[in-house]
Amino acid sequence: MKKTIYSFLLLTLFSIHLNFAQDLSKLSDGPFIFIEDEAIIEKTIKYGEVVVDKLENFQYDTIYTPNKSYYDNVSKIAALSDIHGQYGVLVKLLKTHNIIDDNLDWNFGNGHLVIVGDIFDRGDRVNDILWLVYKLEIQAKKSNGDVHYLLGNHEFMVLQKDLRYLSDHHMKVSNLLNLDYDQLYSNKTILGKWIRSKHTIIKINDIIFTHGGISENFILNNGVDLGVINTAMRDNMDFEREKMKQTSLHEYYYGRDNLTWYRGYFEKYFENHKLDFSESDVNKILKLLDASHIVVGHTSQDQVVQLFDNKIFGVDSSIKRGKSGELLIIKNNKFFRGTFYGDLIPLEEQNLDKIINN
């Protein structure tokens, strides 16, 4: 009997090991580009094997300076958020609306593309999305356009070692490279340095863009200078969350009024809500910011939505599910839903009780 049980356990362990090895043999990701002793080292996973190359230093910038926080006279804008590793959905949306061409190159002229946070976590192709955005940012500037990758709560979580939302794929990548996942985007990597130059909030024309939202309390405590706010948000990007919990900084980065976690605009649509956010509350915030509209992600719905007579726009259209998504398209101060299939639908009053599904 004991021998039978022992044989069964051995067979089970062998089967698990074989399946794991087969899974790894299908695994590919990268490149992950590290700066080591002034050398540029590229590590790529190809079918479960780590391939290492030394690159010429001039192939990538190693210094990234934050862009400005305010932009004027932009005639066309596309915005989306909460991509969460869903590379295929992102590419289809951008192609369908002529933001990129069939070669995945910039095709939006002098327009601005705003990614309102949360490329990281959940889906498998985070790294592919980061490199695509990195490339498009360079190309857009050459056409007098721009790409703005704003930081969301999941960017801060990963950089601050809160790795609860990693996919199995990313855990395997981390194990193969023998590094904690956050170290793949540390300040000693090309993408890590680039990400650390990014903003949390910007203003284009009279429109504020930020991941969660901005509350009156946040403004009263932190002011309205977006450049100052962005610098403050970058200052502690490498402070581990567990250690941060012992300090007042934790509330600043993870409190309910933080720019990347706020849900106040939508709260009245939630069960057991504690806050009845009104149009007069929106108007106070907009007046303080000298703005007419706010665009946010973070709170999931099935489509791009507007609240309070086009003063608030929610662009988290549940791309994270990996099935479809939408863009907010702004042309000459007119607002449209850019659907997954290429339609442009003017934004009107919607029944949000049927749409919001967070």
Image: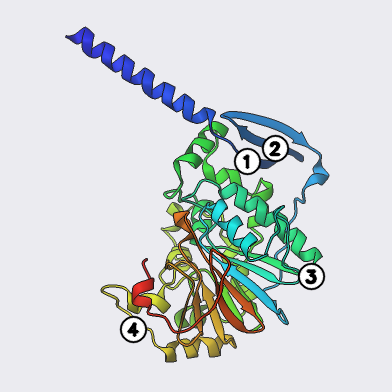
User: Could you tell me if residue 344 is visible in this image?
Assistant: yes
Sequence-earlier tag: 2 or 3: 2
Sequence-earlier tag: 3 or 1: 1
Labelled disc at residue 30: 1
Labelled disc at residue 47: none
Q: Which residue is more in the foreground, 236 or 130?
A: 130
Contact between marks 2 and 4 (CB within 8 A): the answer is no
Q: Which residue is mark 4?
A: 276
| Identity of the residue drawn at 42% across and 49% down | 164
Rendering coords of residue 286 (x, y %): 53, 87
Sequence-earlier tag: 4 or 1: 1
Q: Which residue is mark 2?
A: 42
Q: Name the kind of residue labelled 3 in the image.
A: Asn
Label 3 element class: loop
As drawn, 271 above or below 282: above
Q: Which residue is mark 3?
A: 144
Contact between marks 4 and 1 (CB within 8 A): the answer is no
